[in-house]
Amino acid sequence: MAATLHPPPIASLNVVAGCRSPGDARRVTGSVKMAEGERAADTGGGETGEKTAEELKEKANEYFRVKDYDRAVEYYTKAIALNPDTAIYYGNRSLAYLRTECYGYALADASQAIQLDAKYIKGYYRRAASNMALGKLKAALKDYETVVKVRPHDKDAQMKFQECSKMVRQKAFERAIACDSNNRSVVDSLNIEGMTIEDEYTGPQLQDGKVTLDFMIELMKFYKDQKRLHRKCVYQMLVQMKEILSKLPSLVEITLDKSEQVTVCGDTHGQFYDFMNIFQLNGLPSESNPYIFNGDFVDRGSFSVEVIVTLCGFKLLYPAHFHLLRGNHETDTMNQMYGFEGEVKAKYSNQMFQLFSEVFQWLPLAMCINNRVLIMHGGLFSEDGVTLDQIRNIERNRQPPDSGPMCDLLWSDPQPQDGRSTSKRGVSCQFGPDVSRRFLKENGLDYIIRSHEVKPEGYEVCHDGLCVTVFSAPNYCDQMGNKGAYIHLSGSDLKPKFHQFEAVPHPNVKPMMYANSLLQMGMM
């Protein structure tokens, strides 16, 4: 039986990966001053503290201007409560949700604005932007077309319409090609032995086709100097990765002895220099220093190739002691929008991106330690009753569906109140403490570890300790001001021990440099 989903109250909203958060140092000062002034106005000089809907909207606009999007959403929501029939309030809140990547909420607000006022053009803009972010290109194109018809001389609208139209045609062509080559792997068309490594190439090479520790040390130094590994080496590694991953179950289960420890890391999102800092702080991977990286290795950060190739190298070097789980960004739709596809094509070729896609499809979906701690990228499920056996039996070698256990493992988020709610992301759901308690009790587990969300401190413990979030990309996208974190788990007690770290300098290459051009244009 399907669960009933309810939208959460505004106070329950968590920070999505990419959202502006209270940890954003660059806008906190202005926001705090505004809040102090607001409290003074509400409590002094005989003021009643009551405001009209329009005054609340203006206050929200002020917060929006200083990039305090969470507070902006709060005040747009108050304005809507007083006047629920004004399209612009929903339209403005939709834009704030877009800025915080709550695309599901943004889509709902834009649709409501259009329903209230079919001539409200910004509503179509924002609904198109929401659908674009969710990979729903045809729906976005329809709204951009509406804007262009009403504003034929709007250059920005024309540009977005043309770009979206081009993407729809491109995807249709790619689907046709995929049908022609159904069930054929990129591996079948590769002639790796015939690839020549040029004399002028001075970088690392595999030893007899195998990854060694010396190779990995040289590779990391090579990457830090912004040099490019030879394509033959990358292909060799990806072919071996696919073979290793395809032999793993969807739920990987390991046992830690009392004297053993494993490090759990969250999202790294192409932030190579911060990723390298984890090894600087915590030691290189080895059989005595195992790691688990919990998905979202790529996209947004513009060194995603360097991150994922390094991860692949350590997986090949220590297959039983270095573990990789799939995130929602190890998928074609996200890679097409948020940069990894563009980066691989820029640094190598479309063929290589297709092979990365095949490798990603074989990444395990979850991991269980000592039958007590379950790790996944997103979270728990849209329905009760899911068992570990069901996770074990998921056919994962595919792009994830829009719903069901595989989708939830990659996409869902916790919420503070009991029950389930519609997802702020527009995919899967949000689950409460009662959902966590039931799932853990039914499956004999202690707690879950997940990632998927920026946290100001790099981690968060919620649901009375039953749900732990870890995020390992500090100062996410060069603008969030958050810390990164990783977790130590010891076999003796399996209690999470958190280690925080700050962002480190990196070359002057901006995040999202390879992202879809519509995202780079910004969202009106």
Image (cartoon, helix red, strand yellow):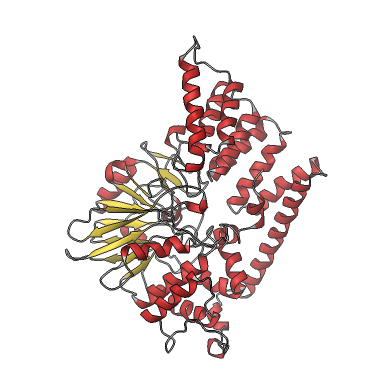
In the displayed structure image, the side of residue 274 where residue 461 appears, left or right: left
Q: Residue 359: in sight, yes or no?
A: no
Point out the residue furthest to the top here: 46
Q: Nearer the viewer, residue 428 or 161?
A: 161
Residue depicted at 47% across the width and 64% down the height: 272
User: In the picture, residue 433 is in which quadrant?
Assistant: top left
On screen, residue 143 above or below 10: below
Q: Is residue 272 above or below residue 421?
A: below
Looking at the picture, tell me which residue is in the foreground, 439 or 316: 316
Judging depth in this view, the residue of 204 and 150 nearest the camera is: 204
- Left-right relation of 426 to 267: right
Does the image show residue 276? yes
Q: Quadrant of the C terminus?
A: top right
Residue ranking furthest to the right: 153
Q: Position of residue 133 (x, y in %)?
A: 59, 51
Seen in the picture, residue 45 relative to 488 is either above or below; the reply is above
Q: Residue at x 60, y 26 (%)?
A: 58
Q: Position of residue 241 (x, y in %)?
A: 43, 76
- Toward which corner of the image does residue 418 lie, by quadrant? top left
Residue 476 x %, y %: 48, 52
Residue 207 horizontal side relative to residue 107, left or right: left
Which quadrant would residue 370 be assigned to in this image?
Answer: bottom left
Estimate the x, y position of residue 181 in percent, counting from the top left: 61, 75
- Number of numbered discs on residues: 0
Residue at image position (39%, 62%) is: 277
The quadrant in which the N terminus is found is top left
| Image point (61%, 22%), residue name | 54
